[in-house]
Image (spheres, helix red, strand yellow):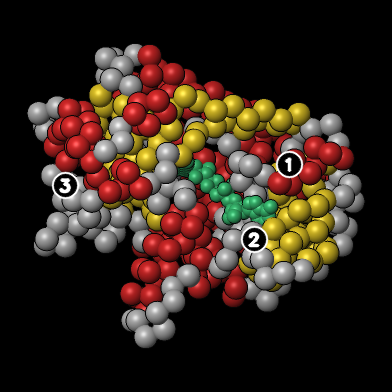
Amino acid sequence: MAPCCDVGMHVTVVGGGLTGALAALYLASRGYVVDVYEARADPRHAAPAAAASPSALRDAALRKAADASRRSINLALSTRGLRALGRVGLAERALEMAVPMHGRVIHDKRGKLRLQPYGAAAHEVLYSVSRVGMNIMLLDELEQRRNVRLHFGCKCVALREDGSATFEKAAGGVVEVEAGRLLGCDGAFSAVRALMGRVTRLSVSLEYIDSGYKELAMPAGKDGKHAMPPHGLHIWSSGELMLIALPNNDGSFTCTLFGPFRTLESVRTAEEVLRFFETHFPDAVGLMPDLTSDYINNPIGALSTVRCSPWNFNQMLLLGDAAHGVVPFYGQGMNCGFEDCIELDDALEATGHDWAAALPIFAAERKQATDALADLALDNYIEMRDKTVDRLFLLKCRVHAV
Ligand code: FAD
């Protein structure tokens, strides 16, 4: 990527998650000076044991950071996300840590598996990647850039019309940021969006669905290998419930159980958990040694759709889940946040980096695409909930190799 002509222009990025880190990398590659403010601690410094080996340290860091984020541990990366990583030279590195998934592996109640390939061609695959691993790759890359400064433990608490902002430091005190360009990449419960709403007429809707999710672990077998065929996205469906499992490159799978809150909450004791899984997902039970403690201890995550308009005000812009959070039944939220980065880059290039011209064009065009994605993801959820015997939904559900 070539730097833009006006090298040295400054941008504040709020949120150093997946979208914010990639957006910062795009801007840095164009020559902007970028300050990234992230509310959480640096996920790379989450491991305390100084004497541990580098790989053990990193594994411990990944686990601790995943716990801290309380978000899905792994994600399906598709062509859309890979294309955006590719423009900043990171597609290969992302693929090195990914497990390719060639299709859906459908489990029936008798434990029989059926592969539904994503496409006829070998390249039509999805990749299972670690959320924290992706974040760390992006942060490592940002740290190499002289024109980027990363500020962890800094939470955005105030924002004014001119883009000046206040950040509260976890260690105490505040940081004041001067007026200027600012990207709000701080997720579905965006503080930037809420604060922008105080200085402009920003319409926002955040709509929860009845279902939530619980993450459960399926460790590697005794031989260190995956306990199920590794190169697929495993799916079990039973009434209103759906269990999925995505492979990790250490031989484990991360399983996610989706279902109505009232059902997930009604299962409380170890006996109830076992009975519930033996009824609905019998062939998974023996592969999940920590099932009962995982189920009892892990929280139920809520799922929502965020729509808002306009995404931009003066020199400020919302990106990623802050602008367009979607329910995960298409597996495209992160991919879409990554695609925002490439589309914003195109809009800035097309307008000669005139932010006043680029932001409204980008926001209006992009909103159409993300509204369509939000509808598709909700349609899949409704189809899954209402047509539970219709196995056709599984053909469309959760992830598409685009
Ligand atoms: P986030 O990931 O929410 O990052 C926001 C960052 O901002 C965080 O680091 C946060 O700490 C920081 N922050 C928040 N508030 C402040 C503040 N006030 N000041 C400073 N920093 C702040 N997507 C896919 O593409 N594929 C999948 O397979 C997939 N599966 C999913 C499964 C589940 C169960 C869920 C819930 C989501 C899934 N998604 C998937 C969606 C994906 O997780 C999101 O779309 C993605 O994380 C959005 O990234 P983001 O950077 O915009 O927001």
Q: Residue at x 57, y 30 (%)?
A: 305
Q: Residue at x 31, y 17 (%)?
A: 388
User: Residue 192: x and y, percent?
Assistant: 74, 47
Residue 246 visible, this orientation: no
Q: Quadrant of the N terminus?
A: bottom right
The residue that label 3 is drawn on is 287
Q: Residue at x 29, y 14 (%)?
A: 390
Q: CA distance from mark 1 to mark 2?
A: 15 Å
In the foreground, 162 or 340:
162
Residue 75 in the image: above or below residue 323: below
| Callout 2 secondary element | strand
The residue that label 2 is drawn on is 38
In the foreground, 181 or 207:
207
Contact between marks 1 and 2 (CB within 8 A): the answer is: no
Is residue 257 rendered to the left or right of residue 66? left
Report crowding for label 2: few under 14, some 14 to 19, many 20 or more residues within 10 A (C-alpha).
many
User: Residue 316: x and y, percent?
Assistant: 80, 47
Q: Earlier in the sequence, mark 1 or mark 2?
A: 2
Is residue 346 rendered to the left or right of residue 212? right
The residue that label 1 is drawn on is 193
Q: Quadrant of the C terminus?
A: top left
- Tell me which amino acid carries mark 2: Glu
Is residue 24 rendered to the left or right of residue 50? right
Q: Earlier in the sequence, mark 2 or mark 3?
A: 2
Where residue 48 sits, quadrant-wise, is bottom left
Residue 196 visible, this orientation: yes
| Callout 1 secondary element | helix
Contact between marks 2 and 3 (CB within 8 A): the answer is: no
